[in-house]
Image (cartoon, grey):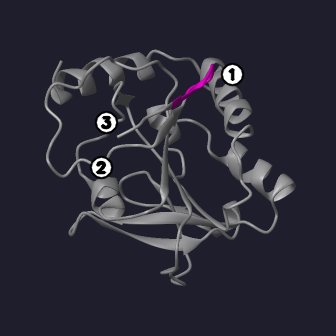
Amino acid sequence: MNKTEIRKQETLKRKALSQEQVAVLSEGLLEQFATLDFSLVNTIHIFLPIAEKNEPDTFLFIAWLKKHHPLIKIIVPRADFNTSLMTHHPYKGEQELLKSSFNILEPIADEEYKGIVDLVIVPLLAFDDRGYRVGYGKGFYDRFLEGSSSLKAGLSFFKSVGTIADPHVNDVRLDLCITPDQIFYFKD
């Protein structure tokens, strides 16, 4: 299937989930996430969930990191829909977030992080057996990850879609994808 077909199919699957299912699946994702080796991770970029789109609850991940790895710096994005670029900001708590006009929680503070990011938690609608992903189609993460040496980890409630038929030349592949049941690792 191509990206457009996959995007439609996976959006419908995600919309069909109840809030209880999203919570259970998010807990499963966290259990798998917690098995990763964080010994070389000093900074992690993590997307904030769009609840209306039934995205994984990454606030669970943030709370777990703060408890188990309090020295890891947590960075969250702010999207500029005019340029399709993101800026990155230190996470300072839910009280320091505001919903944008696109219903995305974003940091209020202008303090920007421009240092090295060791691990990026990447949002997606679907992934394939090679590590390609289908997002919402704006390319924010592909631009951010282009040329990056960061470990790139997707979060998916569902298994691989097999093969995405039309990856773009600028699509950045994931290194791994976390599902509620297992972690898929991709090799070159």
Q: Which residue is mark 1?
A: 24
Label 3 secondary element: loop
Q: Nearer the viewer, mark 3 or mark 1?
A: 3
Q: Secondary structure at mark 1?
A: helix
Q: Position of residue 161 (x, y in %)?
A: 34, 18
Left of 112 or right of it: where is 131?
A: left
Disc on the earlier residue, 2 or 3 = 3
Left or right of 84 in this view: 53: right
In the image, farthest residue toward the right: 67
**Residue drawn 82% across and 64% down?**
70
Which residue is disc 2 drawn over?
A: 172
Residue found 52% across the figure and 80% down from its top? 115
Q: Is residue 23 above or below residue 96?
A: above
Of label 1 and label 2, which has the lower sequence position? 1
Q: Residue placed at 67% from the left, 48% from the top?
A: 59
Q: Nearer the viewer, residue 107 or 163?
A: 163
Quadrant location of the N terminus? top left
Would you place residue 30 above or below residue 70 in this image? above
Within the image, what quadrant is residue 66 found in?
A: bottom right
Query: Which residue type does callout 3 highlight?
Result: Tyr
Q: Which residues are magenta?
A: 179-184
Earlier-in-chain disc, 3 versus 1 = 1
Label at residue 132: 3
Q: Measure the alpha-carbon separation of dots 2 and 3.
A: 7 Å
